[in-house]
Amino acid sequence: MSKICNKCNVDKNLEDFNKDPRNSDGRSGICRACKIESGRARREQLAKTTQRSAPTAKACSECTTTKPIDEFYKDKVCVDGHSSICKECKTKKVYAWREANKDRYNASQRAFQAKVDPEKKYGAEIKRRYGCTLEQYNEMLVAQGGRCAVSGTLHNPAEKKGRLYVDHDHKTGKVRQLLCGACNSLLGYAEDKIETLEAAIAYLKKHNGAA
């Protein structure tokens, strides 16, 4: 069987038309080739329109408040290249949906996390926070014999909080070595102040063995 495309007027096989239950023959009135070409032309026109009318602000369709354009997520489907809903309203809608669909959301998150490689995830985290690659982390881990540079605690990511953490200078951002969670927190709470740590040592010596 065949039919004539409403756009190019060419008689083509039904297989050349997308399925569409709204039509009597169950197929779209426009062939796939014409639909693809129309989509391409529309995207090009949309790009030109967006370039011509790059706005600096727009009104949110949800809260109706006019906000700077950077308060809207980018969306190439929209004429101006930005979502019709502002980031704040979008976030509220997302959290509202999660609250109303807790079981579904939690199930999808568990399924997603099950597919994530823990090592790659940690590698991405330390790269983002410290500029340290997973390869550099592993090199430090080998150099330290798999132990904390202060307490000697053994690196064991299989245990909760058993992984060694990347320690860095909070002023310069320079990565120093790998520490266990306790030692990393110790330096953090002391704000890297040597005098504070020395005072703590003196305090412990003073009270060591006290009744």
Image: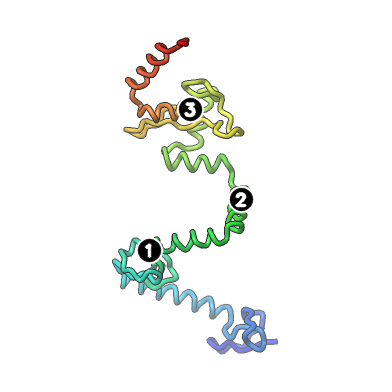
The residue that mark 1 highlights is 72
Q: Amino acid at mark 2?
A: Arg
Decide: is 145 above or below 117: above
Residue at image location 48% in from the left, 27% down from the top: 182
Q: Earlier in the sequence, mark 2 or mark 1?
A: 1
Specify the amino acid type for callout 1: Phe
**Classed neighbour count for the residue bearing mark 2: other residues with Cα under 10 Å, few (<14), some (14–19), many (≥20):** few
Going from the N terminus, do you reach mark 3 or mark 2 first? Answer: 2
Q: Could you tell whether 137 is left or right of 50 in the image? A: right
SS state under label 2: helix
Residue 6, can we see it? yes
Counting from the top left corner in percent of width and height, residue 45 is at: 40, 76
- In three-dimensional space, the C-alpha distance between marks 3 and 2, rounded to whole angstroms, equals 29 Å
Check the image and report above or below for 12 versus 177: below
User: Label 2 belongs to which residue?
Assistant: 110
Residue at far front of view: 211
Residue reaching furthest right? 1
In the image, 144 versus 109, the foreground residue is 109
Secondary structure beneath label 3: helix
Disc 3 + disc 2, Cβ < 8 Å: no
Residue 186: x %, y % from top left: 43, 27
Q: Residues within 10 Å of mark 1 (few under 14, many from 20)?
A: many
Q: Is residue 80 above or below residue 112?
A: below
Amino acid found under the numbered disc labelled 3? Ala
